[in-house]
Image (cartoon, rainbow, N blue to C red):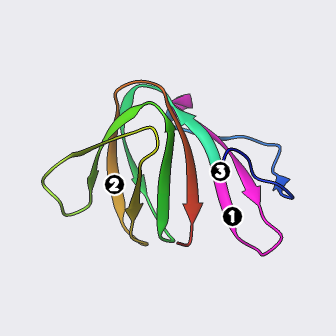
Amino acid sequence: MSQFDNVSVVKQANVYFDGKCVSHSLLFPDGSKKSVGVIFPSTLTFNTGAPEIMEINRGRCRVRLKGEADWKEYGAGQSFAVPGNSSFDIETLELLDYVCHFGN
């Protein structure tokens, strides 16, 4: 899917880690929420409340889920799931363009 139709966009950007991650929230008529954004090359740790699916549109990254020892690499067209009330480390190897699907 290359676009989302019939959504509301929160105008104020979500800016994390001193601007290394910037996204905008999308609100859907069914009550679901997604964010679309970019992560600049860096190594960061994100905490989750709800389960998430991170869909990679462009770029490459390495991810290590909480409690796992090994990193896994992901690129454009791939995705990874993160449990709720958890965390993950992400190392972006180049500019990462992503969609985060919440509550999946």
Q: Earlier in the sequence, mark 1 or mark 2?
A: 1
In the rendered structure, the answer to whether residue 84 lies left or right of residue 19 reads left
In the rendered structure, the answer to whether residue 49 lies left or right of residue 15 reads left
In the rendered structure, the answer to whether residue 7 lies left or right of residue 65 reads right
List the residue tagged with mark 3. Answer: 1
Q: Earlier in the sequence, mark 3 or mark 1?
A: 3
**Residue 33 shows in this picture:** yes
The kind of secondary structure element at disc 1 is: strand
List the residue tagged with mark 2. Answer: 88
Number of numbered markers: 3
Labelled pair 3, 1 in contact (Cβ < 8 Å): no
Q: Which residue occupies the extreme front position in the image?
A: 1
The kind of secondary structure element at disc 3 is: loop
The kind of secondary structure element at disc 2 is: strand
Q: Which residue type carries mark 3? A: Met
What is the C-alpha distance between the residues marked 3 and 2? 25 Å
Residue at image point 52% right, 72% down: 104
Q: Within 10 angstroms of label 3, few (less than 14), some, or many (20 or more) residues?
A: few
Q: What's drawn in magenta, residue-wise?
A: 18-35
List the residue tagged with mark 1. Answer: 33
Question: Which label is found at residue 11?
Answer: none
Q: Which residue occupies the extreme left position in the image?
A: 69
Q: Which residue type carries mark 2? A: Phe
Q: Within 10 angstroms of label 1, few (less than 14), some, or many (20 or more) residues?
A: some
What is the C-alpha distance between the residues marked 3 and 1? 16 Å
Whole-percent x and y of residue 100?
56, 54
